[in-house]
Image: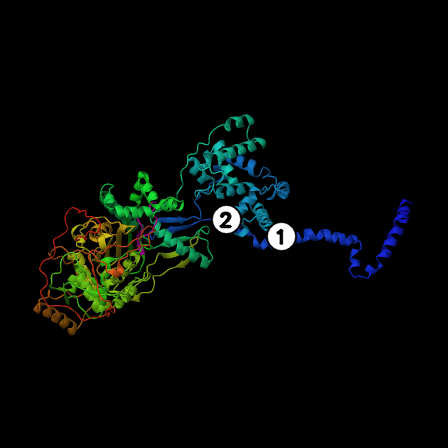
Amino acid sequence: MRLDKIKSLLVPPLTQAWAQLQPVQRLKSLPSLRRPTRRQALLAVAAVPAAFLLYVLVLIPFTPGISDIRKARFERPAQVLSSDGKELAVFKWANREWVKLSEISPAVVDALISTEDHRFYQHHGLDWRRTASAALHTFSGDRQGGSTITQQLARNLYPDEIGRAPTMTRKLKEAITAFKIEALYTKEQILETYLNTVPFLYNAYGIEMAARTYFDKSARSLDVLQSATLIGMLKGNSYYNPVLNPERALDRRNTVLAQMVKRGRLDAARFEQLKKRPLRIDFERQTEPPGPAPHFAQQLRKWLIGWADRNGYDIYADGLVVHTTIDARLQALATQAVTAQGNRLQSIANAAWAPRAGWAASKDLVQAFVRETPEYRSAVAAGTPADEALKHLLANPAFMQALRQQKTRIQAGFIAIDPRTGQIRAWVGSRDYTQDAFDHVQSARRQPGSTFKPFVYGAAFQQGKTPDDTLVDQPVEIQLAGGEVWRPTDEGRPSGRAMTLRDGLVYSRNTITAQLMQEVGPSRVARLARAMGVRDSKLDTVPSLALGTSPVTLKEMVASYATIANAGEYIAPTMVTRIEDRDGKVLQEFQPARAERALPAATTQTLLDVMRDVIDRGTGASIRSRFGIRADVAGKTGTTQDNADGWFILMHPELVAGAWVGFNDSRVTLRSDYWGQGAHSALPIVGDFYQHSLRGRIIDGRARFAAEEESGVFSALATQVRGWFARLFGGKGPAEAPGARPAPRRPALPPPEADVTPQPPAQAANITDASDATAGMALDHGEVVVAVPEQAPAETTDSTAGTAPAPSALPAPPPAAPATTAPGASSAPG
């Protein structure tokens, strides 16, 4: 009855209202105003969660797969081994040492669960109550996080796949991955993985490295206060950094302790005692051990990442085993030689650049150093007048001492290559990787000086010239583009006599080499250098290229000399022999690169024979006299302007090795005309290395370079005619036939001339790849005369060889003790 009464009261007014709306009734849109049916209402209500569920299903393929999760749990970094099975490096993606959950202090786990996820053992990856609470607070303007430990682990393990943007999509992907992790792992495994992967700043990943970094102890030994401090950092590593922000870190630590009390994991009375104690941080950065061949390992890492990407592997997780060409014994000898000679030269540099010696005498240079520092630029950018900023820094003893030590630190590079295979056997990129990680073998480009001259003589011999051909040792003037004249000189004055090409290279005469370059042509020399191994650095095709003014790398030069030792065939240097998986299955083997003919074998034998004399009686004679090496070896020294770069490369049938010595900034030199030369700076490194390698029988002292067979009457007759002609016209006599000799020739001859390369005006700059090398080198030996501009000289000119008798004496040897000279002084013999 009540329902009928309600109808009688409501129907008449509604009918009247409907009648008034009859004109509008005709509109097609009005049927939609009907009351929805129950089915329609249910469908509308179900559409929202259905769409949400569909979106979740669509996201699943874009989350990490189960196999990836397993790999993350059991990742194994690539292991790098030497050719004799010694470990050289382990490629970890982070500085981390995995420890089991049983090896972590229980206080860490209590602090973590109390603070980050107190219902950790009740949920299955997602805490619905905490998520809902966080959502309500966020909607009300008080943004809060609601991630569980498992969700945080998912975000830490897969930042690229999940992302870190504060969006619904990211939270859903994070939750899906968390469910997968919970399905795969036990709670203990999740805690162990989380604590071993979470970052703690200063390249410390995981609780073990964090404990060592901040408290100098293991994770097992952390007490409650230390555990609370580290767990407190998880809310914001930088904001709660106990090193830089100790007050914030202390407050956060006490908050963690309070949460432990709230969750029943710490006694309240104990908390009142602990919260008053200081942090007591014992901070020390944890660095990975560099290993026996750190520069080689860094170059290898770059190559291996590319190989792994192309072949679908992860160098940080798949347990690859990389077998390299490095010989651990030779690597140890090379490191020892570089360290010993570097320390000797550093004592000389310290004396030469003492505060009241060379440092004080180089006022303009020191001020230039100061202006290049970040401290100076920051002061000027902040509004300090330039003169005032300079004066302030010059008066700062600590700053100036650090600057002087940085600029005057001797550096060196060394590499050894097997010429028969191109395999790199030893690689030392600097004196100490921890102090200077810059690689002076492959990354630094420096002027090679006289070590470049064999390319000139090789090109000349390839054109038909012989070691017994002569040129007059006389002043040389070479017209350059732009109207300048380059006058290359040597330490001693020209003798005015004829000198054979053999002696021109043996005694490293710049005047002879410059004349020979004019006959051969810079383009031809540059092409030969590229064919022999200088393939990455740009070579300027100018006359001064003959004296090594185009910067190159040590690796390129040693690879080029390896071409000479390999009978003129270039083989690209290689680092790896094979790669295996974690189970020992060979994934790929690497054979030596294909040999490329760069120089005819006969020409190579001639060049090699002349370079033997460099060691027997020339600028590299101390290899015999000082280090007692009697093996069949050949080589060349090199020194650049002002002794900025010292070079020496030695060839043995089984091993070619070279060293460079200098400073990162080429404006700094040893200030000694004796110690600055390659024969006294770089040669001892190579000599020490070969001496111990031969003594240890790592390389065969009886090995001989392969001889190019000369057979037939005509070849023998040609040799006799050349010898007769040379004797008749005052030459040095017949040259020994190319090929291996039973023992090195060591005739009693005067000491060698200087081996210093003067710079032409077009090559005044000597810039390296080092970060702080910013200037060129002064012109001391090469006199420059401004003339009327003319066209550049032709590549090949008429020979200026003379027939005067060869010089009977050479300049006196260098002094027994180093002579220190002021900057800009002429280089001394050696």
Could you tell whether 38 is left or right of 238 in the image? Answer: right
Residue 700 in sight in this render: no
Give the SS element for disc 2.
helix
Task: Magenta stretch: give its range.
Answer: 424-439
Residue 511 location (% of width, % of height): 17, 62
* 523 relative to 138, above or below: below
- Kind of residue at disc 2: Ala
* 284 relative to 675, above or below: above
Q: Is residue 15 magenta?
A: no
**Residue nearest the observer in this picture, 328 or 174:** 174
Q: Which residue is mark 1?
A: 56
Q: Residue furthest bottom?
A: 714
Q: How many marks?
A: 2
Q: Residue at x 85, y 56 (%)?
A: 20
- Kind of residue at disc 1: Val
Q: Quadrant of residue 789?
A: bottom left
First of labels 2, 1 by sequence position: 1
Residues at discs 2 and 1 in contact (Cβ within 8 Å): no
Q: Is residue 430 magenta?
A: yes
Q: Quadrant of the N terminus?
A: top right
Q: Which residue is mark 2?
A: 72
Residue 273 in sight in this render: yes
**Residue 99, which numbered label?**
none
